[in-house]
């Protein structure tokens, strides 16, 4: 097992995958890693669904393309529409992965509001979204440690209602899609902003 800091810094967002399958036991280990993430009040308000059926994955990609085309047609500025068309091309590369994991959360009211009976925390989903984000990072690191490539995708959320329907996950919110597979690329390390600009200490 790699040193945790080395593992974190060497992980990459992989967008090209081979046709090689992902072992069932490895999928289970990734999901297990996700489930051991911390969550506010240990509510564990998440659900992860590993999609392996190629027909379902293609249906998901088609739904995302349709949603992107619909939105593009509604953008009045031609330059912005063109830019969005190029950007949205990155929303469907999950179609080439042998496994796509849908990361969802239950949109439950936060505990402060529940116990107080007051709307003290207007953003009710903050606890759930931060928790599922921690779980996704666990999953990405587990995949990387096992030699797989993966990517945290938010672009497909443009078709969240359609994807929820396809996956029969009514009542949940979709936080991300994570395609997983044997990588066909080794992306270069992305640039990072200086730590001094983003961190601080109170002494």
Image (cartoon, grey):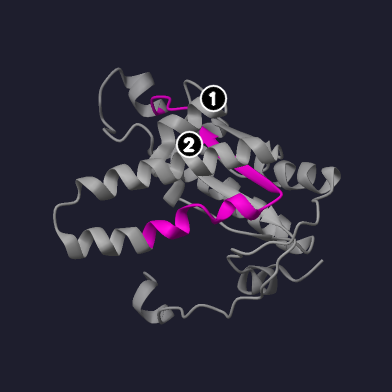
What whole-number distance in Å separates the C-alpha atoms at marks 2 and 1?
A: 9 Å
Magenta-drawn stretch contains 136: no
**Mark closer to the chain start, 2 or 1:** 1
Which residue carries the number 1 mark? 169
Residue at 20% across / 45% down in the picture?
74
Assign a secondary structure to mark 1: loop
Q: Mark 1 Cα within 10 Å, few/some/many (few <14, many 20+)?
A: some
Instruction: Report whether 110 appears left or right of 84.
Output: right
Relative image position of residue 190 (x, y in whole percent): 50, 77
Residue 85 in view: yes
Relative image position of residue 20 (x, y in whole percent): 80, 57
Relative image position of residue 189 (x, y in whole percent): 56, 79
Residue at 77% across / 70% down in the picture?
2
Magenta-drawn stretch contains 104: yes
Bounds of the magenta span? 87-110
Do labels 2 and 1 touch, CB within 8 Å?
Answer: yes
Placement of the C terminus among the 4 image quadrants: bottom left
Which residue carries the number 2 mark? 174
């Amino acid at each position: 097992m790699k040193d945790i800091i080395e593992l974190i810094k060497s992980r990459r967002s992989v967008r090209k995958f081979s046709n090689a399958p992902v072992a069932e036991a490895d999928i289970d280990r990734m999901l297990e890693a996700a489930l051991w993430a911390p969550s506010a009040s240990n509510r564990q308000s998440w659900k992860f669904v590993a999609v392996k059926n190629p027909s379902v994955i293609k249906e998901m990609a088609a739904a995302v393309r349709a949603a992107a085309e619909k939105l593009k047609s509604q953008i009045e500025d031609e330059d912005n529409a063109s830019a969005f068309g190029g950007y949205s091309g990155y929303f469907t590369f999950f179609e080439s992965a042998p496994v796509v994991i849908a990361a969802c959360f239950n949109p439950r009211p936060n505990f402060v509001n529940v116990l107080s009976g007051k709307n003290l925390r207007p953003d009710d989903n903050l606890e759930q979204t931060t928790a599922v984000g921690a779980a996704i990072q666990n999953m990405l690191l587990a995949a990387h440690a096992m030699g797989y490539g993966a990517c945290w995708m938010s672009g497909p959320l443009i078709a969240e209602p359609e994807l929820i329907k396809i996956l029969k996950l009514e009542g949940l919110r979709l936080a991300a899609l994570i395609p997983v597979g044997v990588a066909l690329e080794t992306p270069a390390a992305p640039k990072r902003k200086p730590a001094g600009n983003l961190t601080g200490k109170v002494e």
